[in-house]
Image (spheres, rainbow, N blue to C red):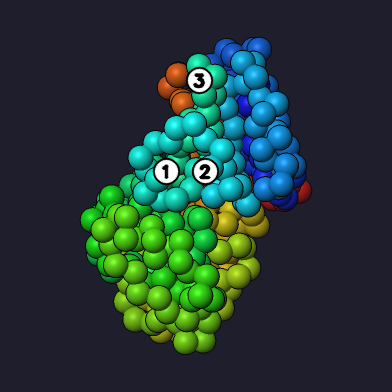
């Protein structure tokens, strides 16, 4: 059986290391998992080429929303969040799923964050929408989101409405919110939130826990600052690991070997860092 991760750019993806480790641990010798460069324009044709020898696809930027009109069916969570990061091929149909939400909830719970009140999200893209759904599961009803362009936050606001939540938009940058927060989730690319590290160290921004979806290089300046102040820190690798584990379960109908996947993923990150730990 075949599977792959699609996106653009996709060469940096850690997903092949995670999925290959899972197949090996599960004894699925005939399974393969590739990284395929694919943008929105190529996505319809690539999906059409996926026959009965395909188990599923992982989707990353910029495809999580572009895939929606190409699906035959979707999990209700996909409809709520407005994005899918997984396509399962079953009985000739394309089924959309979102494993980012469960991956985020699992990663947070492993760090002791099982409930959330006051939360701040950095960013307003597809991952921020999944973060909203994760926060909803943790009991949050109102969230503040710092975005660079409020005019482009329509998808985030629509997601909040479907989830029955309220999102207060704030400026991303110098005018961003300060004060105490139970949870800060950064959904922006590595380096983009570096300015927030200074605010954390100054004590202007005081999060009890920080989830930064970036995972390489690690730690980010934000994560390092949060750790210095005693906040619980959850890295993007944990999110990637747990969302990939759920994808493996959807594609193989087998329990994911999370320990083997973790070991392989961390080994690949060490290799990319030249062996540094």
Tell me the tag on residue 250: none
Q: Is residue 138 left or right of residue 196?
A: left
- Circle nearer the N terminus (3, 2): 2
Whole-number angstrom distance, CA of label 1 to CA of label 2: 9 Å
Whole-number angstrom distance, CA of label 3 to CA of label 1: 17 Å
**Residue extending furthest bottom?**
175
Tell me the tag on residue 78: 1
x, y percent for residue 188:
56, 64
Mark 1 is surrounded, within 10 Å at the Cα level, by few (under 14), some (14 to 19) or many (20 or more) other residues, namely many
- Circle nearer the N terminus (3, 1): 1
Mark in front: 3 vs 2: 2
x, y percent for residue 209:
37, 63
Tags 3 and 2 touching, CB below 8 Å: no
- Circle nearer the N terminus (1, 2): 2
x, y percent for residue 195:
56, 78
Mark 3 is surrounded, within 10 Å at the Cα level, by few (under 14), some (14 to 19) or many (20 or more) other residues, namely few
Q: Is residue 82 above or below residue 187?
A: above
Front residue (pair 38, 213): 38
Whole-number angstrom distance, CA of label 3 to CA of label 2: 17 Å
Front residue (pair 135, 43): 43
Helix, strand or loop under label 1? helix
The residue that disc 3 covers is 90
Tags 1 and 2 touching, CB below 8 Å: yes
Q: Residue at x 64, y 12 (%)?
A: 29
Helix, strand or loop under label 3? strand
Q: Is residue 81 visible?
A: yes
The residue that disc 2 covers is 68
**Image quadrant containing the N terminus:** top right
Q: Is residue 179 left or right of residue 95?
A: left
Q: Residue at x 65, y 19 (%)?
A: 51
Q: Residue at x 52, y 61 (%)?
A: 125
x, y percent for residue 150:
48, 76
């Amino acid at each position: 059986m075949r599977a792959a991760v699609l996106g653009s750019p996709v060469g940096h993806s850690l997903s092949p290391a995670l999925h290959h480790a899972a197949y090996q641990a599960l004894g699925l010798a005939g399974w393969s998992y590739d990284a395929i460069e694919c943008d929105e324009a190529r996505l319809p044709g690539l999906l059409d080429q996926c026959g009965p020898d395909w188990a599923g696809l992982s989707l990353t930027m910029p495809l999580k929303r572009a895939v929606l009109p190409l699906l035959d069916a979707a999990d209700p969570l996909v409809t709520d969040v407005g994005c899918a990061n997984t396509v399962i091929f079953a009985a000739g149909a394309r089924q959309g799923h979102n494993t980012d939400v469960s991956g985020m909830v699992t990663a947070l719970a492993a760090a002791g964050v099982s409930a959330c009140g006051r939360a701040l999200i950095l960013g307003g893209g597809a991952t921020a929408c999944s973060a909203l759904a994760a926060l909803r599961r943790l009991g949050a009803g109102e969230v503040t989101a710092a975005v660079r362009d409020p005019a482009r936050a329509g998808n985030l606001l629509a997601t909040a409405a479907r989830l029955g939540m309220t999102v207060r938009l704030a400026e991303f940058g110098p005018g961003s919110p300060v004060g105490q927060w139970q949870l800060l989730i950064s959904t922006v690319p590595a380096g983009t939130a570096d300015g927030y590290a200074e605010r954390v160290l100054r004590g202007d921004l005081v999060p009890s826990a920080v989830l930064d979806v970036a995972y390489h290089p690690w730690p980010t300046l934000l994560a390092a600052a949060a750790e210095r102040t005693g906040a619980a820190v959850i890295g993007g690798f944990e999110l990637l690991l747990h969302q990939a584990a759920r994808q493996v379960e959807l594609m193989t109908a087998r329990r994911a070997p999370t320990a083997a996947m973790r070991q392989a993923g961390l080994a690949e990150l060490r290799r990319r860092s030249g062996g540094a730990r």
